[in-house]
Image: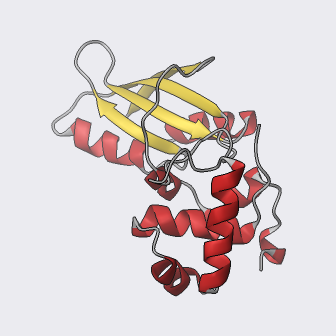
Amino acid sequence: MSVTLDAKDIRILRAIAIEETTSTDRIHEVTDIPKSTVHYRLTNMREAGVFKNDLYEIDYQTAGLEIVLISEVWAEYGKGYHTVVGDKLAEVEGVNNVYFTMGETDFIVIARLPGRDHVESLITNFESIPEIQRTSSKFVITTIKDTESATVLRDYSEETLFAAHGIDPANSE
């Protein structure tokens, strides 16, 4: 179940992720949202369950990132391909983790996405990388254990996070 976040909440969450701080002074400097509003919004998001603890770890489902996709990626072998392809995979919006692996699969990619339409977009972006030969993706049904931090929000554009909460970027002030 998602909590309804507005544009200010999204900007505050991204500031926490990008700046790696919960300082109201720093969040104010980055977002130009008044310090008192930042404090008020942080308190409200904590009470709504957006943060799992005082370390501001994100509850992904509550933050609107309800789908976890695990993808196996096979790439064309070549000198340094793990770095080249890995960097390209890491740049795809929504990708949170990229692992170069041993065995038949070259990469394991973890993505947290706000909806099924984003899954198709993610796979299309994978397929647009010339070195990728094929992919195989799986939806996570139930998460048993997940220990990530708020910095995952760096992996999304502000527009995608707005869209996940039905916010029109033109009216986001």
- Quadrant, the C terminus: bottom right
Compared to residue 4, the image places residue 100 above or below, namely above
Q: Quadrant of residue 124?
A: top right
Quick check: 93 above or below 170?
A: above
Q: Residue at x 44, y 66 (%)?
A: 18
Determine whether 64 is above or below 116 in the image: below
Question: Which quadrant is the N terminus positioned in?
Answer: top right
- Does 5 sit left or right of 96 as displayed? right
**Residue placed furthest toward the left:** 79
- Identify which residue is drawn at 25% across, 27% down: 77
Residue 173 in sight in this render: yes
Q: Quadrant of residue 69?
A: top right
Residue 129 appearing in the image: no
Location of residue 139 in the rendering, given as x and y in whole percent from the top left corner: 61, 21
Relative to 126, does residue 150 appear above or below in the rendering?
Answer: below
Furthest toward the top, the residue is: 104
Residue at point 25% right, 13% down? 103
Q: Nearer the viewer, residue 24 or 135?
A: 24
Tell me if 129 is positioned left or right of 36 in this view: left
